[in-house]
Image (cartoon, rainbow, N blue to C red):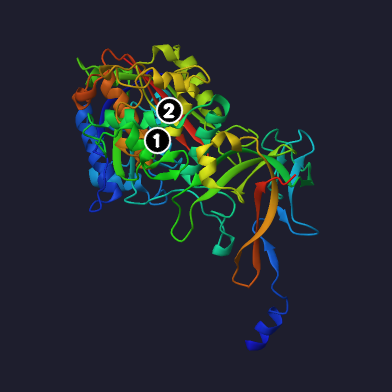
Amino acid sequence: MAEQSKTESTEQPGKRPILPFLKLEPTPHLVGSKCGKCGAVYLDLKRMACSKCGATNQFTQIPLSNKGNVWVFSVIHQSFPGIKTPYVTAIVDLPEGVSVKSNLVDIDPDELQKNPQQAFGMPVEMVANVVSKDRQGNEVVAFQYRPSKN
Amino acid sequence: MRNVYVLGTGMIKFGRYPDKSVPELGSEAALIALKDAGVTIQDVELFASGNLFQSNAMIGQRILQQIGQTGIPVVNVSNACATGSTAFREAYMAVASGMYDITMAVGVEQMGKQGLLGGGGGGSDPAYATEERLGSGLMPAVFGQAGMEHMRKYGTTLEHFAKISVKSHKHATRNPFSQYRNEVTLEDVLNARMVAFPNTLYMCCPTGDGAAAAILVSEDKLKQYAAGRKRARVAASVLTSDPYTERDLTLPDVSTLTRRAAKKAYEIAGIGPQDVSLTELHDCFATAELVHYENLGLCGDGEAGKFIDQGGGMHPGLGGKSPVNVSGGLLSKGHPLGATGVANICEVVWHLTEDDRAKERLVPNAKVGMAHVIGLGSACTIHLLTV
């Protein structure tokens, strides 16, 4: 038994994306599936058919922009036990015609609540942050958004 | 399709019943409905049971094991928050189709102090859970954002959302079936603990237990059993799912499927929103109620804020118009998921038939009532009832 586990653990722990559509190489970015018939874009890389037009087997994988704009947000003050609050959840529209949900970081939740209008349409950029460590010792990386620096 | 009528209704007060089982709660409501209808379980030809959290536990059959095992067909329905109303629709379709003459729907749920719903992800290793790391899937946040869309488009204010909570809490003081019956002021709502912006504690529905039942009959059976008693007709029963919209997969779109359901329901019934005497709509959060005023056509697009400011949604006895959720709504009456869809049909029926169970809050001269439910994921039901 001891020998077997030795051979299994030859792979060094590394970084793992939290979801399959986050790619870490060469630099962190999101990918989507684009329907060849109607152009709808999905974050699901194993799609069988397009839920917009019904076309099958016409998907190509496309890279998604690291920049987007905030559609709407909420600030979470009550969450599951053990989760630190507050945090800001947001829907971010990407230029490829797909939206993603993630945290807004490097932003003051209090300020957002005082003046929510400032967030609507706000240009943001993706950052890849290590958020946890899994049972195999891999660092788990999530994509999050911060106000654009330029 | 044949005309279908609600011959009897039953509901238990929503609240917490830790000493009772789900089948027991459902049976209580079912027995009240049978008595109200003036029929026995031997008369019922099909039974539709709505329950979400024990949807693999044959709740319908277990209710019949309590109240009468007659061997009739039983369907167990699960459709998120629209579970109860989908069960009602199954019972409706069974009569409308001509296949059966007397059917029963029961919606029941036991949630206890379950707390927040939604969120999660990650599979077997919590290191991959997404809550807080990739935004939030918690219901207060999802519906908070639905309200934020309205704020973004139309400049809706926190006060508008808060006023809905004040209104529904006021309504609940006159409903003995309501889980909470306390009044709150605008300041109470705005200053309450923030759960998920802009929804404060009083703008979120509670969890709890409850059950409601309805007995549906054909016109012939109505004549046989309801002689001299006022009974409501189901003028439209519509169920929709969420059509493709660009953001739907990241931010559930609760509006498009509601608009489609409303349009179809009005068409089937041959009426418009101006004809509706009262509405029970799915106010799981105050933000949801506001967007549904427009989705259901109670006011024009972008006018929900004005609608609220002018007394829209408030009981006419309290100086309002177009009354919405005179039961107290999910915000006060409670939201035991599987029970909700049947309970709000009971409420509408009670006003239309001037039932004693609504005497403290009766909407005068009610001729048309609307019951709307959204189950996230998504399912929308709209029932229009008339007398």
Could you tell me if residue A74 is visible in this image? no
Q: Do callouts 2 and 1 point to residues on the same chain?
A: yes
What is the chain letter for disc 2? B
Between B231 and A119, the residue placed more toward the observer is A119
Residue B322 coordinates in the image, percent (x, y)? 37, 17
Dividing the picture into quarters, in which one does residue B153 lie?
top right
Residue B166 coordinates in the image, percent (x, y)? 33, 30
Could you tell me if residue B251 is visible in this image? yes
Residue holding disc 2: B160
Q: Tag 1: residue type? A: Ala
Q: CA distance from mark 2 to mark 1?
A: 34 Å
Per the image, label 1 sits on a secondary structure element best described as helix
Disc marking residue A9: none
Between A148 and B141, the residue placed more toward the observer is A148
Residue holding disc 1: B87
Per the image, label 2 sits on a secondary structure element best described as helix
Identify the image quadrant of the N terminus of chain A.
Answer: bottom right
In this view, B322 is above or below B118: above
Residue A85 coordinates in the image, percent (x, y)? 48, 54
Counting other residues with Cα less than 10 Å from the Cα at mark 1, is it few (<14), some (14-19), or many (20 or more)? many
Q: Earlier in the sequence, mark 2 or mark 1?
A: 1
Q: Tag 2: residue type? A: His
Between B94 and B371, the residue placed more toward the observer is B371
Residue depicted at 63% across the width and 88% down the height: A2
On screen, residue B330 versus residue B306, left or right, reads left
